[in-house]
Image (cartoon, grey):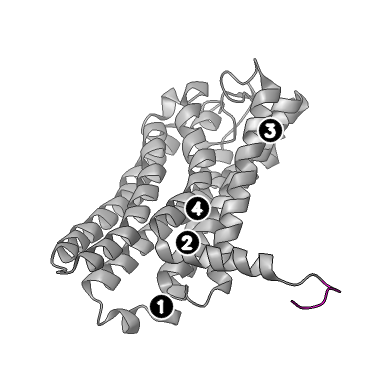
């Protein structure tokens, strides 16, 4: 698992060994079936949302454009972690990950997770404009604007993740190589560094304080104005429609923010025991998000019904038309 080098400043660890999730070693086959079911539902649900938003002309507002990005992010986020977890349940070799592979997994995870964080903030701003500034909304949130905002979230996420990945893997790793976690994340990887990680931990905490908390403050501020505007709507139908589009977004924001804060605000305590909240926002939440948006959004439900009915009514090739 290690590779000796003459230069002590070079990395001597060539592979890491992922500890996996607690309690899964007793019944690996059962948990493998559970995870493959969750992963299948996640990919199917998010792919359906993505196809529906992309093909249905009734879902042409910026809100659904951002929803398509969110579905793509959730599918990718689940793909970064779940297949490796399932491989570790099948064989012992499945828990081994190369040093470079660990860096790639950490980068991809934080790239997707941070992009999702910024996207939630943009979605809150979109809801603020739509409800609080309805007359200016079509002008302000035009095609160039919402496409640019989506692109910016991806760009900032890429830079944000590159900074953390570089700071993490520029350290000296000389062993041990056992990561007490089910994927390569910053806190458990830093615990294996043969160097002072104080700066890395300060940067990580600053990231929580400035980026995540900053985004959350903007989201909460947006919804304070939104709630005030919704309460001024006179018709019950209008209030219900406004609440339906906001409730789903607020729910997924809570599912996204609560577990990571528990993990990254206590980096030294991260380990196998921190796997439960991490599983929730890396594996369970991406599966739940499509259901949350379809259960509380009538337009998405109707669009899904149109898509499914269209698929079932298509004439098979070579058959006469009805």
Residue 318 among those drawn in magenta = yes
The reply, left or right, for residue 160 in relation to residue 242 is right
Q: Kindly identify which numbered label has been placed on residue 86.
A: 3
- Marked residue nearer the N-terminal end (4 or 1): 1
Q: Nearer the viewer, residue 153 or 250?
A: 250
Q: Is residue 88 left or right of residue 296?
A: right
**Residue 14 locus on image (x, y percent):** 72, 32
Instruction: Check disc 3: other Cα within 10 Å, few if <14, some if 14-19, many if 20+.
Output: many
Magenta extent? 317-322
Q: Residues within 10 Å of mark 1 (few under 14, many from 20)?
A: few
Q: Residue furthest bottom?
A: 139
Q: Badge 2, how many Cα within 10 Å: few under 14, some, many 20+?
A: some
The dot on residue 145 is 1
Q: Element under label 2?
A: helix
- Label 1: element kind: helix
Q: Is residue 152 visible?
A: no
């Amino acid at each position: 698992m290690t590779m000796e080098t003459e230069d002590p400043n070079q990395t001597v660890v060539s592979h890491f060994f992922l500890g996996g999730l607690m309690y899964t070693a007793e019944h690996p086959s059962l948990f493998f079936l559970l995870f493959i079911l969750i992963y299948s539902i996640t990919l199917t649900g998010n792919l359906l949302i993505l196809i529906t938003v992309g093909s249905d002309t009734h879902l042409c507002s910026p809100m659904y454009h951002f929803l398509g990005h969110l579905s793509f992010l959730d599918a990718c986020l689940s793909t970064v972690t779940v297949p490796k977890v399932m491989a570790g349940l099948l064989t012992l070799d499945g828990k081994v990950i190369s040093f470079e592979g660990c860096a790639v997994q950490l980068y991809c995870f934080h790239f997707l997770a941070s992009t999702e964080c910024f996207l939630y903030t943009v979605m809150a701003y979109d809801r603020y404009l739509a409800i609080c500034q309805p007359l200016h909304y079509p002008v302000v949130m035009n095609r160039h604007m919402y496409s640019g905002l989506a692109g910016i979230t991806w760009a900032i996420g890429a830079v944000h993740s590159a900074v953390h990945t570089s700071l993490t893997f520029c350290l000296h790793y000389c062993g041990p190589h056992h990561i007490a976690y089910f994927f390569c994340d910053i806190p458990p990887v830093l615990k294996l560094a043969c160097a002072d990680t104080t700066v890395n931990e300060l940067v990580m905490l600053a990231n929580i304080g400035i980026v995540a908390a900053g985004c959350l403050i903007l989201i909460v501020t947006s919804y304070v104005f939104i709630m005030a505007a919704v309460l001024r709507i006179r018709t019950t139908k209008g209030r219900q429609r406004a609440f339906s589009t906001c409730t789903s977004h607020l729910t997924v924001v809570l599912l996204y923010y609560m577990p990571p804060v528990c993990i990254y605000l206590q980096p030294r305590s991260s380990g196998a025991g921190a796997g439960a909240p991490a599983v929730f926002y890396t594996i369970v939440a991406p599966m739940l998000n499509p259901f949350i948006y379809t259960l509380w959004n009538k337009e998405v439900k109707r669009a899904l019904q149109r898509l499914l009915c269209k698929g079932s009514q298509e004439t098979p090739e070579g058959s006469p038309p009805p």
